[in-house]
Image (cartoon, grey):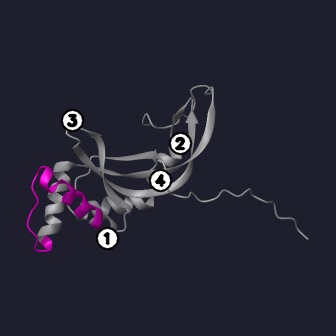
């Protein structure tokens, strides 16, 4: 269980509320591994290789984003902490992005164990990454805010069906 997960049984939390958020999940890949992957993709298209550094930094993530979407994934983004130059050292091949209710326990957003689990999409993604020659570091799930201007799906109360 990650520090991002709601504990199953450690007494009752003092305050819990549910908030609507995006739940994103995917496989984290190092920058070096992502660069090698992007260069394999570019070589297959007859394009010149990319180099480590800021000049090709955006082209690497765009190349990977296009490939992840071609393979049926959601997207590929920079991931993890930034260094003092604003450089990310990991990518996430996002396999899932869905709306959900996320518990806020004592003021901190946490995922439930079910929200954090890998599902069938992740099993397919593992095979595709292996077929692409990509060594991923770990699977990670987290809650994310809705993008500016995004309209979440409306929540309607469940109405019981009355037999006539």
**SS for tag 3?**
loop
Q: Quadrant of residue 127?
A: bottom left
Eye-nearest disc, 3 or 2: 3
Horizontal side, residue 148 vs residue 90: left or right: right
User: How far is mark 4 from mark 3, CA to CA?
Assistant: 26 Å
Span colored in magenta: 44-66
Q: Earlier in the sequence, mark 4 or mark 3?
A: 3
Residue 51 location (% of width, % of height): 9, 55
- Mark 4, Cα crowd under 10 Å, few <14 / some 14-19 / many 20+, is few
Q: Is residue 6 above or below residue 93?
A: above
Q: Earlier in the sequence, mark 1 or mark 2?
A: 1
Q: Which residue is mark 4?
A: 148
User: How far is mark 1 from mark 2, CA to CA?
Assistant: 30 Å
Q: Which residue is mark 3?
A: 84
55 or 44, nearer to the observer? 55
Residue 64 location (% of width, % of height): 25, 61
Q: Quadrant of residue 130?
A: bottom left
User: How far is mark 1 from mark 3, CA to CA?
Assistant: 33 Å
Residue drawn at 53 percent across, 36 percent down: 6
Magenta stretch holds residue 62: yes
Horizontal side, residue 79 vs residue 13: left or right: left
**SS for tag 4?**
loop
146 or 115, nearer to the observer? 146
């Amino acid at each position: 269980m990650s520090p991002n997960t709601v504990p199953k049984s450690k007494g009752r939390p003092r305050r819990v509320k549910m908030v609507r958020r995006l739940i994103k999940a995917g496989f984290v890949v190092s920058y070096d591994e992502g660069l090698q992957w992007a260069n394999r993709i570019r070589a297959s298209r007859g394009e010149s290789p990319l180099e480590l550094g800021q000049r090709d930094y955006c082209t690497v993530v765009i190349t990977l984003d296009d490939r992840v979407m071609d393979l049926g994934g959601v997207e590929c983004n920079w991931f993890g902490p930034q260094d003092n130059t604003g450089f990310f050292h990991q990518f996430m091949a996002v396999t899932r992005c869905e709306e959900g209710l996320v518990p806020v326990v004592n003021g901190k957003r946490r995922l439930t164990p079910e929200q954090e689990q890998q599902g069938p999409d992740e099993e397919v993604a593992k095979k595709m990454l292996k077929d692409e020659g990509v060594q991923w570091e770990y699977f990670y799930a987290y809650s994310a805010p809705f993008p500016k201007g995004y309209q979440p799906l409306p929540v309607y109360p469940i109405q019981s069906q009355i037999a006539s």
